Image (tube, rainbow, N blue to C red):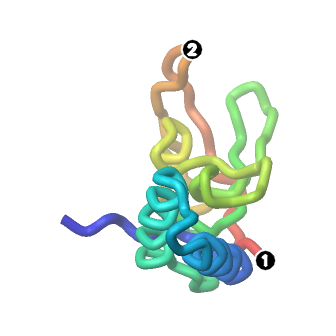
Amino acid sequence: MTSPAVWMPPATLAALQAEIATLEAQGSEATLSDKARVVELRALVRNADVAVKPNDGLVEPGMLVTVGFADGSTDTFLLGERTVLADDRALSPRSPLGAAVNGRYVGDQVTYTAPNGPATVSVVAAEPAA
């Protein structure tokens, strides 16, 4: 079974590769947790997707997404794995909201199960992350 692609900016991929090199340079000094981290990092690097997404209105990892809520408020987030991205706005595509909007287009409305019950959002904007 192959792991799904994990979107990340090229700079993040470079940082992960540098961390692997640093940990591997420890050689016999490496701890068990260091070795486990190398395995984890290699999987992330192997599954890295650093492509700039097209500005076609499709919500997918690597996009800055703005959603509108029923009360008129909006929220903007970067759709991508929080564990990889150094961005406080990151929202996992596996989270309830992330999964609900992933694969939708600007203008689409979707209902999903939020922690406090059903919620409906509209996709207001989706732009490639810089």
Left or right: 67 with respect to 83? right
Quadrant of the image occupied by residue 1: bottom left
Kind of residue at badge 1: Ala
Element type at mark 1: loop
Contact flag, marks 1 and 2 (Cβ < 8 Å):
no
Q: Which mark is residue 116?
A: 2
Q: Which mark is residue 130?
A: 1
Query: Does label 1 or label 2 sit earlier along the sequence?
Result: 2
Query: What quarter of the picture does the C terminus occupy?
Result: bottom right
Relative to the observer, which residue lies in front, 35 or 29? 29
Kind of residue at badge 2: Asn
Residue sticking out furthest to the left: 1
Relative to the observer, which residue lies in front, 111 or 81? 81
Left or right: 128 with respect to 110? right
Q: Residue at x 32, y 65 (%)?
A: 3
Circle 2: is it few (<14), some (14-19), or many (20+) Cα within 10 Å?
few
Quadrant of the image occupied by residue 120: top right
